[in-house]
Image (cartoon, coloured by chain):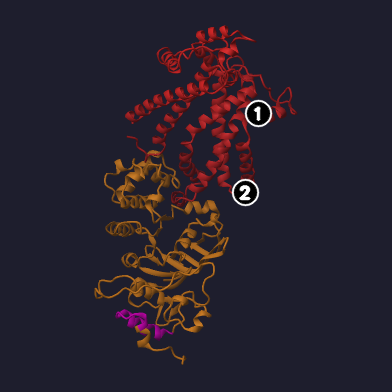
């Protein structure tokens, strides 16, 4: 995974919004990369900065008065310094985005066909007839039955799943190299979720695009992602391959996420363990490790020291921002993986070295 | 859809009957002065007043009077005769219709174009100096009554009494067919005065509606597609215009009410001024005729707005 071949490389991105109550640190220094044809899953709670970082990639936070620093390199070009017209040429063309709620994301008064044609004609000099043909072709591509008829219908005449298919068709209009999917299945029924994820995987294979999928749902990333970045309070706290995150997670927040969802390979009567507390304020984030107020394993000095995202010695592609000792982390996870609660795990592992 | 329109039209006719009845009762029950006394001259003999009452049909009972009136209106489209000039109300109105239409249609065009464009510009430059200035000005426009605004305009710009003698003043109206240029210049001030209130309401509504819409998800989608700013704003305006459009029918009523004042201030020989004079002289048939005509306009405007709404918002289907 060398930096040179990354399609998208985000470096030390900060996004802040001045507000009446103070500065909101929505994204607080994140670094990640996406390689051509691969899928990155960005996981985190609401308000962890995952959507803001993606909107910033497309320059969509610019006019909201955001203060942005860092670099977002797409094919070597820094999108943050690109003038608006240059960004516009990339939006919907090289990088496309789909959103959580397909009904509110489609214009209610324009026919679906018109909205698709606009996406085509924003970047290609084609006639209306050609664009319409392409719109019908795109609807077919995303598995819409009877595209020639559906193209003349309004969004409210489609079901939720079909609307998201329309959004995907719109995103694919110009065969982007990168598709950013922000909670693409959250507003959909479970059965439809699987269809949409399956569709995205199929299209990725056929078109060879990279995908960034943003979600709070670990089930979705388990299905889709090659790599995972876990975000908390505007930062990435852990990043590794998907297999690695599920098999050997290193950050207590990731453990919390994993233990808070039901799993088929665990006993049916096992209780889910929610993460205690609420997501922190992004105006006055906690001192030290941002997760320490909610972390069952936090030690006193963790409220003073700010952990950096660093590779694990034994597994250099796996990065984690945690102040706990590596060996201790592994012991704790071993307890949790076998069904222990955080308290039981702490009791079994014992107090940290150096404490009395 | 057809059934809906028919139902609305029938309902409109019922409404017109009600309007007819209410104005009839209102002007006859209220002590506005007996028209027979007004017409009988100075120090009239009671006998003369009685005679005039018989001629005008005022001696009959109120229901009988109303029935006679309604019969004439429905069967012969005859609105009666002015107590004052004996002129048929129908011809009195039709003679003055072109002046009033010139005034109101022009004002409506100005009101919509100015209101919407000011609203759009304000919404896109929220909290800028320009936004604050025009929104402040619009508040003044909404608050200022037409007759006052009309006098201010005459004082400032009229060629006879104005400080800056640039526009023809009161009483300069001529018909469109007579002299189009004079027609146009004589109506500039009345148009502006009559349109100002509604334009200001529209500007403020458009501003709030569009600022709200510009935060919608589908605007974000439009940007994410890589549409140019103009096209993105187009998406916004298309959605923002709907709630404002429904108000059009109501504003037509405001406009017609304003026409009475503006025609009086600028001395335009239209229906508005005629009804103002009719009210002063208790000329019931003329009052009734103009009120009926105005109601008809408002009802038709509202039906048209509702029908057009079905085309503007594809989610609306009447049944």
Front position among marks 2 and 1: 1
Give the main secondary structure, helix, strand or loop, of the magenta stretch: helix
Identify the secondary structure beneath mark 1: helix
Q: Is residue A35 above or below residue B12?
A: below
Identify the secondary structure beneath mark 2: loop
Within the image, what quadrant is residue A82 found in? bottom right
Q: Colour of chain A?
A: orange
Q: Answer whether residue A198 is visible to the viewer in this image.
A: yes
Q: Do the CB atoms of the residues marked 2 and 1 lie less than 8 Å apart?
A: no
Q: Is residue B3 above or below residue B228?
A: above
Locate residue B4, reporting x and y percent: 34, 30
Sequence-first disc among 2 and 1: 2
Within the image, what quadrant is residue B133 found in? top right
User: Magenta segment range?
Assistant: A325-343
- Foreground residue among B102 and B275: B275
Do callouts 2 and 1 point to residues on the same chain? yes
Taking the magenta stretch, the answer to whether it contains residue A354 is no
Residue under numbered circle 2: B128
Residue under numbered circle 1: B150
């Amino acid at each position: 995974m060398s930096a040179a071949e990354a399609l998208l490389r985000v470096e030390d991105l900060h996004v802040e919004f001045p507000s009446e109550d103070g500065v909101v640190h929505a994204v607080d220094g994140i670094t990640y990369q996406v390689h051509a044809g691969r899928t990155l899953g960005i996981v985190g709670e609401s308000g962890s900065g995952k959507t803001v970082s993606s909107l910033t990639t497309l320059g969509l936070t610019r006019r909201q008065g955001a203060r942005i620093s860092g670099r977002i390199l797409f094919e070597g070009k820094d999108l943050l310094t690109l003038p608006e017209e240059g960004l516009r040429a990339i939006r919907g063309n090289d990088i496309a985005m789909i959103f959580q709620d397909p009904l509110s994301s489609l214009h209610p008064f324009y026919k679906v066909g018109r909205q698709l044609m606009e996406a085509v004609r924003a970047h290609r000099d084609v006639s209306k007839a050609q664009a319409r043909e392409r719109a019908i072709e795109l609807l077919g591509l995303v598995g819409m039955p009877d595209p020639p008829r559906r193209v003349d219908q309004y969004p409210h005449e489609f079901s939720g799943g079909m609307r998201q298919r329309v959004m995907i068709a719109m995103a694919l209009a110009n065969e982007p190299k990168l598709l950013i999917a922000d909670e693409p299945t959250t507003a959909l029924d479970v059965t439809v979720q699987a269809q949409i994820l399956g569709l995205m995987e199929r299209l990725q294979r056929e078109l060879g695009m990279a995908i960034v999928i943003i979600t709070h749902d670990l089930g979705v990333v388990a299905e889709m992602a090659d790599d995972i970045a876990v975000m908390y309070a505007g930062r990435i706290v852990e990043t590794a391959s998907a297999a690695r995150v599920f098999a050997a997670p290193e950050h207590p927040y990731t453990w919390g996420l994993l233990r808070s969802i039901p799993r088929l390979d665990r006993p049916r009567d096992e209780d889910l363990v929610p993460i205690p507390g609420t997501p922190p304020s992004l105006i006055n984030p906690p001192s030290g490790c941002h997760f320490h107020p909610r972390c069952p394993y936090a030690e006193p000095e963790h409220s003073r020291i700010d952990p950096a995202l660093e590779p694990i010695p034994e597994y250099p592609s796996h990065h984690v921002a945690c102040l706990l000792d590596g060996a201790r982390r592994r012991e704790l996870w071993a307890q949790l993986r076998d069904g222990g609660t955080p308290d039981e795990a702490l009791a079994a592992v014992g107090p940290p070295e150096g404490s009395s | 859809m057809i059934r809906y329109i028919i139902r609305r039209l029938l309902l409109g006719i019922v409404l017109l009957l009600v309007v007819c009845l209410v104005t009839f009762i209102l002007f006859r029950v209220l002590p506005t002065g007996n028209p027979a006394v007004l017409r009988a001259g100075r120090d009239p003999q009671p006998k003369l007043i009685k005679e005039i009452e018989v001629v005008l049909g005022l001696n009959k009972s109120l229901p009988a009077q109303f029935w006679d009136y309604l019969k004439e209106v429905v069967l012969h489209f005859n609105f009666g005769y002015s107590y004052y000039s004996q002129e048929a109300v129908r011809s009195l109105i039709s003679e003055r219709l072109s002046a009033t239409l010139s005034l109101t249609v022009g004002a409506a065009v100005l009101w919509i174009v100015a209101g919407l464009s000011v609203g759009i510009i304000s919404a896109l430059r929220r909290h800028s100096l320009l936004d604050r200035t025009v929104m402040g000005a619009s508040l003044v426009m909404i608050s200022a009554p037409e007759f006052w605004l009309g006098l201010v305009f005459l004082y400032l710009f009229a060629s006879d009494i104005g400080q800056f003698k640039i526009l023809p003043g009161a009483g300069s109206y001529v018909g469109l067919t007579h002299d189009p240029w004079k027609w146009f210049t004589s109506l500039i001030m009345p148009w502006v005065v009559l349109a100002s209130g509604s334009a200001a309401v529209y500007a403020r509504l458009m501003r709030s509606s569009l600022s709200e819409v510009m935060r919608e998800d589908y605007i974000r989608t439009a940007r994410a597609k890589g549409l140019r700013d103009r096209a993105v704003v187009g998406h916004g305006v298309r959605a923002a215009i709907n709630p404002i459009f429904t108000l059009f029918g109501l504003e037509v009523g405001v406009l017609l009410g304003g026409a009475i004042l503006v025609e009086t201030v600028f001395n335009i020989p239209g229906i508005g001024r005629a009804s103002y004079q009719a009210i002063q002289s208790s000329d019931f048939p003329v009052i009734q005729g103009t009120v009926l005509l105005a109601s008809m306009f408002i009802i038709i405007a509202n039906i048209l707005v509702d029908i057009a709404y079905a085309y503007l918002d594809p989610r609306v289907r009447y049944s």
